[in-house]
Amino acid sequence: MTATIGQVTFDCQDPYALSLFWTEVTGYTEDPDDPNAPEHTENFIGPDGGHPGLLFIRVPEPKTVKNRLHLDLVPETTRDEEVERLIGLGATLVDDHRRPDGSGWVVLADPEGNEFCVERSKAERAGA
């Protein structure tokens, strides 16, 4: 037997704001039958409002150590263009592992410090 992933859950201090950030990152949407709101302790986004998606749950404490789990994003544009777009949305640069030959990845953090990586696009990998 196997299990499927229903959602990836982020503990955070402002679930609504973080859901808005990740909506811009992924293009995911909220569930139209259960819209997100600032006063909710849980906010969900997913592909066309479905699963697997991202769930943001309010917790009282801030993030204090490196994530034990993170997302690796593969952009439709180039890796470098996506990094610039995400920084413009409020992400911060954590570590840069880009190599002179074009391989590598970039580690960013969302507005609450959750780390994630941006890899090369499929087109960039195919052209390498």
Image (cartoon, grey):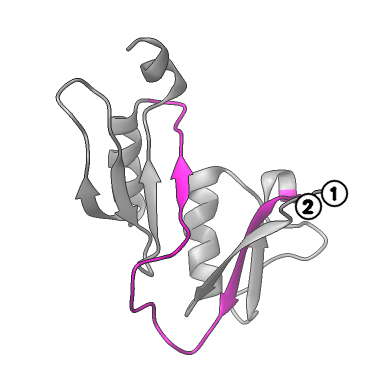
* Residue visible at 30% across and 49% down in the picture: 107
Q: Which residues are magenta?
A: 49-77
Magenta-colored segment: predominant secondary structure: loop
Asked which quadrant contains residue 44, the reply is bottom right
Q: How many marks?
A: 2
Query: Residue 57, position in %: x, y?
Result: 59, 75
* Residue visible at 80% across and 49% down in the picture: 2
Q: Is residue 95 above or below residue 112?
A: above
In terms of secondary structure, where does tag 2 sit? loop
* Amino acid beneath label 2: Ala
In reply to whether residue 33 is colored magenta, the answer given is no
Residue 72 placement, left or right of 95:
right
Q: Which residue is mark 2?
A: 3
* Amino acid beneath label 1: Met
* Residue visible at 65% across and 75% down in the picture: 42
User: Is 128 or 87 nearer to us in this picture?
Assistant: 128
In terms of secondary structure, where does tag 1 sit? loop
Tell me if label 1 and label 2 are in contact, CB under 8 Å: yes
Query: Residue 21, position in %: x, y?
Result: 47, 57
Query: Residue 123, position in %: x, y?
Result: 42, 16
In reply to whether residue 63 is colored magenta, the answer given is yes
User: Is 52 or 29 nearer to us in this picture?
Assistant: 52
Asked which quadrant contains residue 82, the reply is top left
Q: Which residue is mark 1?
A: 1
Residue 85 placement, left or right of 43:
left
Query: How far is mark 1 from mark 2, CA to CA?
Result: 7 Å
Query: Residue 117, position in %: x, y?
Result: 37, 46
